[in-house]
Image: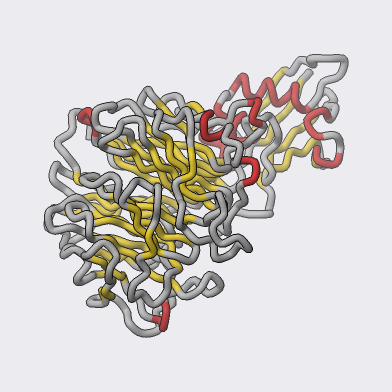
Amino acid sequence: MKVTFRIPGPLLSFTGGRHVVEAEATPEGAVLTVADALGQLWRLYPGLRERVLTEQGQVRPHVNVFVGSDSIRDTGGLTTPVADRAEIAIIPAVSGGAL
Amino acid sequence: MVDVRHVSPKAGDTLVMVGTMKGAFVFRSSAARSRWERGGPYFPGQAVYAMAYDGRAGRRRLWAGSENFHFGPAVRSSDDFGKTWSKEEEGAIRFPEDTGATMKRVWQIAPGRAEEPEVLYAGVEPAALFESRDGGKKWSLVRGLWDHPHRPQWQPGGGGMCLHTVLLDPARRNRIHVAVSTAGVYRTDDGGRSWRTAHKGVRAQFLPDKYPEFGQCVHKIARHPSRPDRIYLQNHWGLYRTDDAGDSWTDVANGVPSDFGFGMAVHPHDPDTAYIVPLESDEFRCTPEGRLRVYRTRDAGKSWQPMTRGLPQKDALETVLRDALATDGHEKAGVYFGTRSGKLFASRDSGTSWTQVANGLPPVVCVKTALVAKGRGKT
């Protein structure tokens, strides 16, 4: 299944400057999930994982992940199902920044 | 675009590394310390609470703990005084899965003793000590402290639940002191396997039991290497000295306008001389009477004198945070501090007179110094 990732400016150093990354993702189980799709992104750019997730595998508190226009916080987190040709956006929350 | 400058230090130069809420800076001067050049900001927009210089084994390596508000912390090193830095994913400090903990901030990076040049320590939030035995490539949690029965009951202070100071005993290889807010001083005598409190006599003004087993809010501890059993301590209320490595502490708040404060440093060649910047109350947390005064003792705390020459003595409501006061290793000691309002001050006569080195920096959270030796690496 094909997935498109949108990468935010502060993480472009990990993707060689690519704002948009397309990847072929394979579901671990019956359905492709956000975790499966992100797993493919980490395989392409290993340093990214630790910026988006904590070492315990949770999405960092001030990072939002959207599938289409829905935040995965409202749709089941990393287990949210992802359809073929879905667009997954990683976006820093507006909750902070340099104070 | 952020205007990033670089410095190119030579052997014999003095470095002052300044971590701020929005990046790291490196100031360079000759040994005379009369003119300063600025490098940075490095990691613009990221808080840098920890910096260190590792000059062991011919290195000339800067360390910085960077913290992207959204995308998390990282430990970075540079072998060319900041022109290039290691990648975020290299040398990451991670809590093991079984702890369930998540690294929030690196508060302290402490190179190990000279005779163990591959060893480094890091104090982090949530309060824990990490150790590297390969020059910072891999880090492991010091389990002895993490598993201490007190740890689940430690409470965060205003700055967070942080292990902010690591002091290695230069005489006893297996002895380390750490300071944790809000928990107190803990000491190991067996290289980190077991830890016990070392803050007997330090008063917890803010608790019903004024002398609890733990829960002291130690803001900073500082020691002189030539007299390792003597340590000075700035508490959340209270100024102390121990001469027995923390077994007992004596109140030395003699003649200071307030015994509240954060920063503390010891003279590089005189264990009787120490520096603090008292702040007015734990609510206001600014320099008393609008006067920016460094207080210096030359008799191990029996008396403290205000150092004011060159420092603003009117309308100066400043705050100096816990890691933002430091001395250098020169014979005529340099003393440095940064303020929350982004000023950096320097003294090259052991604190007697001061000049302002920088103004308009982001809020300063750490100040560290180094004397640059002849290096073997690239510069």
Residue B274 visible in this rendered orientation of the protein: yes
Residue for point 45% across, 24% down: B138
Nearest the camera: B364 or A22?
B364
- Judge whether B176 appears above or below B370 on screen: above
Left or right: where does residue A88 sit relative to residue A49? right
- Judge whether B220 appears above or below B284 on screen: above
Residue for point 68% across, 53% down: A94
Left or right: where does residue A52 sit relative to residue A99? right
Marks counted in the figure total 0
Residue for point 34% across, 53% down: B242
- Judge whether B190 appears above or below B47 on screen: above
Residue B362 visible in this rendered orientation of the protein: no
Quadrant assignment for the C terminus of chain B: top left
Residue A53, position as x, y percentages in the image: 65, 33
Nearest the camera: B246 or B161?
B246
Residue A78, position as x, y percentages in the image: 78, 30
Residue for point 56% across, 50% down: B213
Residue B355, position as x, y percentages in the image: 23, 70
Colour setup of the view? secondary structure
Residue A52, position as x, y percentages in the image: 64, 35
